Amino acid sequence: MSYLKARIADIRILSPSVKLFEIDLGGQHFSYIPGQWVNLKLRTDAANQSAAFSITSTPNGKNAIEIAVKRVEHLPTSLFIHDQLKVGDDINISEAQGDTVLPENIAQNQPIVFIAGGTGVTPFLSMLRRIFSIDRHFHATLLYSVSSADECLFYDELYEMEKAYEGFQFLLTTTREAAHHADFFGRINAEMLKLTGLDHKAQFYLCGPPQMVDDLAALLAELGVAESHIHYDKWW
């Protein structure tokens, strides 16, 4: 895997546990498709460490990408990124990776249902931005699960997207604390999935904690969705 030298251009807080990092590529050629991820290689005091993160931004001619990183106590790389990295620091990033991406020719008669947990929403935000830059009338649904309302990433953008695009449905569920602006309370289940329409022509994209993705892939299959219509990157 080849790496490019890049620099942290900006850091923003998205939630109590997640930060958004803008990575400046310094004029180097870098291409990616919405839905792909990069590997970050970091030199810490202890050793060289690496971790993979989905690209949140969408290709727009800007020579930079954005990634969202959750602070996880038992993951040293996550802690280093949150606690040590600052604007101006150099890092190394890989070329874009991953096959779970938007199809080259997106057809309106084949809607997409995105099902996300936590930071799993990040590749889907990139895809949604791309979809609606091409076709404002495309039919897409995002069913998004978070622990609490303050951990919902990009809520304002997703809410405004739902108002702007008639074909977009944004459904939010919280699993630990009920929220007045959430549609549901609890883990994603069959009843929630049925509210997406469960159109068997639709393509279903999953991203989130491994157990959640495994469980939802099995549940969709039980509900009659063809295996060829269920998409996710599996690294576990």
Image (cartoon, grey):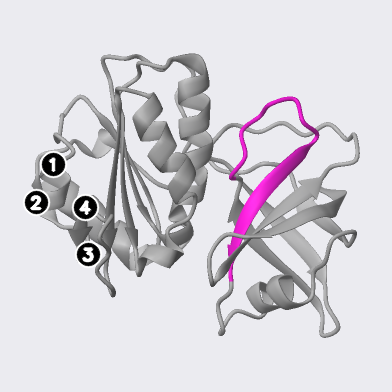
Disc 4 designates what residue? Answer: 183
In the rendered image, residue 146, in percent from the top left (x then y), is placed at 36, 63
Disc 3 designates what residue? Answer: 187
In space, the residues marked 2 and 3 are separated at their CA atoms by 11 Å
- Image quarter of the C terminus: bottom left
Residue 193 in the image: above or below residue 226? below
- Looking at numbered disc 2 in the image, what kind of residue is underneath it? Glu
Decide which of 181, 207 is in the foreground and name it.
Answer: 181
- Looking at numbered disc 4 in the image, what kind of residue is underneath it? Asp
**Residue at position x 35%, y 30% from top?**
163
Disc 2 designates what residue? Answer: 191
Instruction: Determine contact: label 2, label 3, CB under 8 Å.
Output: no
Disc 1 designates what residue? Answer: 195
Q: Callout 1: 10 Å neighbours few (<14), some, many (20+)?
A: few
Q: Does dot 4 land on a helix, a strand or a loop?
A: loop
Q: Does dot 1 land on a helix, a strand or a loop?
A: loop
Over which residues does the magenta segment extend? Answer: 56-70
In space, the residues marked 2 and 4 are separated at their CA atoms by 12 Å
Badge nearest the viewer, 1 or 4 = 4
Q: Is residue 22 magenta?
A: no
Task: Say whether residue 215 is left or right of residue 41.
Answer: left
Badge nearest the viewer, 3 or 4 = 4
